[in-house]
Amino acid sequence: MTTQRTHIMVCGGTGCVSADSLEIVEKFKGALSDAGYSDEVGVIKTGCFGFCGQGPIVKIHPDNVFYVKVSPDDVAEIVGEHIIKGRTVQRLLYQEPETQKKLPKHDEMSFYKKQYRIALRNCGLINPEDINEYIAFNGYEALGKALTEYTPDKVIEIMKASGLRGRGGGGFSTGLKWELTRKTVSDQKYVICNADEGDPGAFMDRSILEGDPHSVLEAMALAGYAIGAQEGIIYIRAEYPLAIKRLEVAIAQAREYGLLGKQIFETNFSFDIKIKLGAGAFVCGEETALIHSVEGNRGEPTKKPPYPAVEGYNRKPTVVNNVETLANVAPIILKGAEWFSSIGTEKSKGTKVFALAGKVNNVGLVEVPMGTTLREIIYDIGGGIIGGKKFKAVQTGGPSGGVITTLDLDTPIDYESLRAIGSMMGSGGMIVMDEDDCMVNIAKFYLEFTQDESCGKCTPCRLGTKRMFEILDKITKGEGTMDDITKLRTLGKTVKESALCGLGQTAPNPILSTLEYFYDEYLAHIQDKRCPAGACKALAKYKIIEEKCIGCTACARVCPVSCISGAPKQKHVIDEEKCIACGACYTACKFQAVLRP
Amino acid sequence: MKMLSIRINDIPLQVPEGTTILDAAKAVNVKIPTLCHMNLKDFGIVNQSASCRVCVVEVEGRAPLAPACSELCTDGMVIRTDNLRAISARRTAVELLLSNHPFDCLLCPKNLECELQALAQELGIREIRYAGEKMDHPKDTSSYALVKDPNKCVMCRRCETMCNTVQTCGILSAVNRGFNVFVGPAFNLDMVDTSCTFCGQCVAVCPTAALTEVNNTDKVWDHLADPKKHVVVQVAPAVRVAIGEEFGMDPGTITTGKLVSALRALHFDAIFDTDFGADLTIMEEASELIHRIQNGGVLPMLTSCCPAWVKFFEHQFPDMLDIPSTCKSPQIMLGAIIKTYYAEKMGLKPEDIVVVSVMPCLAKKAEAARPELTKDDNNNVDIVITTRELALMLKEAGVNFAGLPESQFDHLLGESTGASVIFGTTGGVIEAAVRTAYDWITGETLEKVDFQQLRGLEGIRSATVKVGDMNLRIGIAHGLGNARKLLEDIRDGISQFDAIEIMACPGGCIGGGGQPYHHGDMDIIKKRQAAIYQEDRGKVLRKSHDNPYIKQLYDEYLGKPNSHKAHELLHTHYIPKEKI
Amino acid sequence: MAVKTLEELKRIREEQIRKVKLRESGESDDQTIEILVGMATCGIAAGSREVLNEFVALITQNGIEHIKVVQVGCMGYCHSEPTVQVNMPGHEPTIYGNVDKAFVSDILEKHIKDGQILDDHVLIKTYHSAL
């Protein structure tokens, strides 16, 4: 078997898979085989490249050519032109919007220029279903080094010095968490990986598990060595079947190589991992609820203290770490704490993966050093707002976070600075909103989520979120009163202070934050019965601009509720009472005479 | 024991490590309202879910408020329970609960007894700021014993703790999540279709009317008003040491005489004592035990007078149904005798007699309706009402209980010995059996009838009683979780007992699900128990077989214990049931 | 197939990296030596495919670092196919013509390793990159 001269990397993350990337893989294999090139050219299904808005992605090595929006029908041309004849297929290259230049290499793209991939280092580089490829790029070397050269205390020392903090949102020092668990005396301890990833729109952990599962396994083993545990459990949401499959393959391969199991690297350290599926509850991302779910009980949080480091799974000391946190561990052990702590800000070291979504041009997964500003992420990496519209706010931290406006766009990404402006890092979801988004509706959307996902145990969350949602619903329907704002503020504050767990304690954040920065929108909904952004259907009012209307009757003809009156060649009028705000008239009018709310 | 220095509302104090803020506050006369909290740790019942958030207080240096009932004090902790922040949070919790609660207090079975109502009053709530949708779940009235109304539930989880941790039946649990959560059985089955034993302990701890007993007082009134019916009432031992509490009397007041007067005031045609039935039970059960011991029968033998316990072992240990005694319970035995012996003596037709039992228990309601005990429309017992229901009837009739004179049960089936009174407490049944078994086995007359080693409140107790040459090894358990342990030992072949007494309710019948609510005060249970033993001491006759009316019953009617007639009327069989 | 020691792991790594190295060297362009092999129709007909594969095989065999072999389109020297362009960092590109399998090892040994330009096969010494 000769060494292959070209590798075609095809993205096999869930996003691209849903756009037929697996079919692309098969077509490549077929075309190469037909042309007799199977020995020289390899086709590799790999992890997420992050540029999800441009997927499916195909990358050719060693040419370092980056093809975007590839479809199965393009395969023949790529093989014929590029692989066999060496001619890059220009039409499949990414074109930078500002310069209109075609960029074959990814590091020329503004999407990638400011990124620094540590957690995502292997995504797009290796085949996640082949342990050999993981090993080729220094996989399991950290584990080997730690087991043969370091004591558990030394490992913890390195982790503490690195400054790595929990990437699930909590931001607690990982090294300290391991140290506290190590210190608790017990015959049995556990390492649990939190792969529940419940924040809407977040898919950082999913991509890491799909694209580089071994990095998580190795990190769990390192954690086990550090704290004195022999068993690891990955709690993964059942809605991630591809990630589950990749994990199962990875665990089986690691066991086969003796990298999981008894006496790893011929030391006294034994460690094995099993998978436990979640059952569709956001609250099970909270560590105590997660632990109870793993135990087979109802996934309800319980009070802390005692913390899992002291009393966790089966009442034994347990470390619960997020997937992204774990993905950083092996590089830290290999390259050293100093290297890691040289990246980022004073209190927030390393990088953070964000799932950039919403009204930006470049949606996808980005990994940036801490300290990168929100403006850089949204405009330089994200490519600015779609359609050139006006930026309104960005929301970080999912349903637990607050909104950030233009005033704070130059805030560097950092645990403390985000909290200082009323939001939080969260797990990495970053939703960008523009002038067409209604902030009251956004708050309502998040409350709808939290009150649906509330476990129901404590009064403030069970009933408080429900009541806050009911008030917001009223407001978006034009039935709100000024007293409702007072109620939202007081109830929100009380729920924040008296709820049992993080879900309830942070549920009011979207409301309190939007009230602070977009008070005028609330006033418009309540006093004017108007939704300035035009998103609240009940308040949306369409109007015909008299001066522009020529009476062509196009709008009246398409109106599903026949609420537009007017004779041909006469000015038309919309009956606001009957209007259902469907927007058909707006689309039909060729004279821009319909004013959208 | 390490001592910690803390401050509560500017008051400095020292508390031992492991003290909660709630208990520390009590020490300096600071009251913090609670709802879901219930601490009966003497009985292994601790509900500390910290979920109602009614008890939250401010702890300096922490952003969230802390639940006082479960938060442990730390050295240097500074606590404020009285500032606006803490008070307003506590009020909001109650306001939110009220916003999701029916407003039919005036018509509610827990009117004036409801803990939520008391909180609303205590916190001076005058308006519901946050009104909105209210839960709408169907009521479960499927069983004879209890009623489940999830719309009145405040999710305190006390019933769940009782049913799962203490009684180990696992019937009640939270179902669904968020606003739609409610407490119920798996698959939301009707209670009557589950393995619920109807022990009623969930009812005993429920702070609202989410769980209450089935109220049979209407039926009793109807029968009392029917001239064609001869209504006979019998009263359990545990009732007489507790019913006074419903009328403002101290817990542990023995009210036997007043109780009988009260029943006379309601115009029952005959007033008998379940204690007589208990003496009868001892006659049959002691004989059965001796027979098993002397003829190589199945040992250990288990008592069977507690119907919740009977249902428990039918569902959970259906393979071991040859172990319990075949005796019916005292109320059922007495009912059977009333409908035959008494009917014949009085020249009455059994179908014209209505037997009403006043019991501390909810399971007795289900027991009375068991098919084996209601064959051919000939019910041993027709209606069961609880201590609480009788108190309601007395209040309705305007009976001034505390001021009543003493009166006596009707003799024929109303005379009883001290042995029968102690049936009301854990350890009492087996002590009564030993008193009789001793005389019968040894042929001697037992002088020292108080068996202290069988008394107490620990969940599982054991003692060896020397009866002649034999060492009778006795085991006692109260609370079904403790019962389960003894049963599992038997199943595993490592049981070390000859006879075991089981009561489903912690404390025995005195702590039954139908007794006046104790609201978490264990002292009440202890006082009731002391009263039981005091009543026993006050009796002239202390052994069941010394009861002259029992002797008369056997001479005239039954012949001997375990005779054919005795078997027909006073013994029963058990049916294996599925576990759900 | 257990990996018992750190040395064994490193051995597997060394073995495996050879197969996937081309992805790594594809990432960093600054210090990488580039071998561009013309793969137009005339080139393929003259045997450039075998030439390319020979480069790959020898590089792997000899463990040469910081080098990548890329196929490119027609360079225009159809009369001298197979053509190979050598880009050494810091040097002007060199284009060789009439390259055969045997000459491949010379390029690697003498030009790349020793820095010696092999004049007899050179077509152009100075040329802007074909890419």
Image (tube, grey):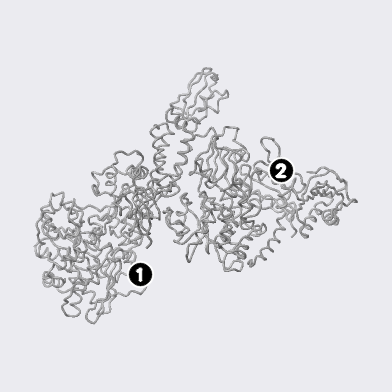
> Residue A253: x and y, percent?
61, 62
Q: Which corner quadrant of the image does residue B374 belong to?
A: bottom left
Find disc 2 in the rendering and name its residue.
A104
The mark found on residue C79 in the picture is none
| Residue count near mark 1 (Cα–Cα under 10 Å), binned few <14, some 14–19, many ≥20 | few
> Outermost residue, top direction?
A570
Find disc 1 in the rendering and name its residue.
B488
Residue B21 visible somewhere in the drawing: yes
> Residue A275: x and y, percent?
52, 58
Picture residue at 26% right of the left edge, 59% below the top: B522
Nearer-the-camera pick, A25 or C128: C128
Task: Report the amino acid beneath label 2.
Answer: Pro
Q: CA distance from mark 1 to mark 2?
A: 73 Å
Q: Chain of mark 1?
A: B
Image quarter (top left, top right, bottom left or bottom right) of the N terminus of chain A:
bottom right
Task: Report the amino acid beneath label 1.
Answer: Glu
Q: Which corner quadrant of the image does residue B192 belong to?
A: bottom left
Q: Chain of mark 2?
A: A
| Residue count near mark 2 (Cα–Cα under 10 Å), binned few <14, some 14–19, many ≥20 | many
Q: Is residue B92 left or right of residue A356?
A: left
Q: Is residue A107 left or right of residue B249?
A: right
Residue B135 visible somewhere in the drawing: no
Dot 2: element? loop
Dot 1: element? helix
